[in-house]
Image (cartoon, rainbow, N blue to C red):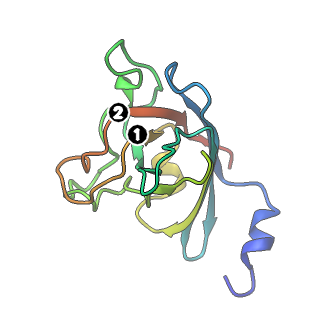
Amino acid sequence: MRNQGLYSLLRKQPDAYAIIKGSQEYNSILGKAVFYRTQFGIIVITSVSGLPEQAQNCANNIFAIHIHEGEECTGNEKDPFFNTKSHYNPNNCPHPYHAGDMPPLFATNGNALSAYLTNSYTIEEIAGKTIVIHKNPDDFKTQPSGNSGTKIACGKIIRLR
């Protein structure tokens, strides 16, 4: 990445992306995740606005985000994103070592930005899967999903190249 640099990477088209939209209850949420293939792994950059805010000090403005194995952001009355299924976990690892486990989103005034590098999957493996934001932070220990709570937003990962 020394020669490539993050700034030059951001000028090129991503290898995949997902437009993230909130459920009917959280319809102000809108975001995008972009996936770039590099020689070191996949760089994932996620930006989201409209996340629910807690007004008091020391409030929960941390949200779990994961890649799920399901291919649709649809569901039912109880779970609007039920069809996203479970976390993407092709190697049957315990949580938080699923391939689809991602660093949490830290929101400020309802906005969040995250960037990380992973070699847990390839673009081909996640294309067509879903990315889900949960209402609570991930506790990184509770099985199978970190006690991350209600699914509040979802997007389908689309491969571009």
Element class at badge 2: loop
Image quarter for residue 81?
top left
Label 1: how many Cα within 10 Å (few below 14, some 14–19, many 20+): many
Q: Residue at x 56, y 40 (%)?
A: 51
Q: Name the residue that disc number 2 marks.
A: 150
Amino acid type, label 1? Lys
Do the numbered discs 1 and 2 sit on residues whose CB atoms are within 8 Å? yes
Element class at badge 1: loop
Rendering coords of residue 59 (x, y %): 42, 51
Q: Residue at x 49, y 21 (%)?
A: 25
Q: Residue at x 31, y 17 (%)?
A: 78
> Taking 23 as reference, is 18 left or right?
right
Q: Name the residue that disc number 1 marks.
A: 135
Q: Is residue 61 above or below residue 12?
A: above
Label 2: how many Cα within 10 Å (few below 14, some 14–19, many 20+): some
> Taking 113 as reference, is 120 left or right?
left
